Amino acid sequence: MIETKDLILDKARYEDWQAMYRNVWSRPQSFQYMVPELSPNEAEAQERMRRTIGFQAERKTAYTIFLKSTREAIGFAGIAQLEGNTWEETGICLGPDFWGRGYGTQILNCLLCHAKELGAKTFVYSSWKENAASRALAEKAGFRQYGLERHTRPHDGREYTLVKYRKEL
């Protein structure tokens, strides 16, 4: 578990499926700049929570994001080791009702500190070119752009460009 001023990054529990469905998984805005798809109904959200719990058990640095004040699930985030002492974020996603409150900054800062504790010397961050808020977050945190990558989202064929950023820790 990792805490910020307003948030807790912790492992999901099955009972969090309703909050994740309401706040994130059923909201198209949450996935406009991500590869995963939304969950169209409650049955899919329940199954997604089962998969999420398994994924987070396998990956010790994958988290569900909770409001500290209520323990309501509002998003997900994680990091992974690329190679050696280089780590990357594996996605930061908040439900749209929680945008614009400084939570992205809190999450990115705590992920950077966590990666550093795990031995990271370099941290890589990626953002869809169209995602101005994510790009601004990276730049505000001191990341520097080093590349662009073209991709196609598998479920709908949408082409997108990832802006790649790097920061020495």
Image (cartoon, grey):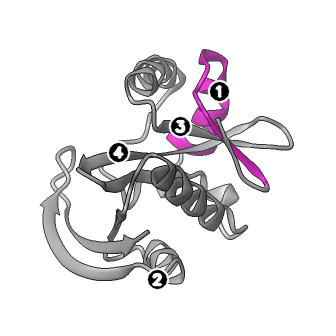
Q: Which region of the structure is painted magenta? A: 6-26
Which numbered disc, 2 or 1, marks the residue closer to the eye? 2
Q: Position of residue 103 (x, y in %)?
A: 67, 61
Q: Earlier in the sequence, mark 4 or mark 3?
A: 3
Identify residue for label 3.
63
Q: Residue at x 32, y 73 (%)?
A: 166
Kindly indicate whether the residue at mark 3 contacts the one at mark 2 (C-beta within 8 angstroms). Answer: no
Q: Earlier in the sequence, mark 4 or mark 2?
A: 4
Q: Nearer the viewer, residue 88 or 115?
A: 115
The secondary structure type at the circle numbered 3 is: strand
Q: CA distance from mark 2 to mark 3?
A: 23 Å
The secondary structure type at the circle numbered 1 is: helix
Identify residue for label 1.
18
Q: Which mark is residue 80?
A: 4
Q: Quadrant of the N terminus?
A: top right
Q: Earlier in the sequence, mark 2 or mark 3?
A: 3
Which numbered disc, 1 or 4, marks the residue closer to the eye? 4
Q: Nearer the viewer, residue 87 or 14?
A: 87
Q: Amino acid at mark 3?
A: Tyr
Q: Position of residue 67 (x, y in %)?
A: 76, 45
- Mark 4 crowd level (few <14, some 14–19, many ≥20, 10 Å Cα): some
Q: Amino acid at mark 4?
A: Ala
Q: Position of residue 6 (x, y in %)?
A: 78, 53
Q: Earlier in the sequence, mark 2 or mark 1?
A: 1
Q: Residue at x 52, y 77 (%)?
A: 141
Please determine whether, in this image, residue 168 is positioned above or below residue 84: below
Which numbered disc, 1 or 3, marks the residue closer to the eye? 3
The secondary structure type at the circle numbered 4 is: strand
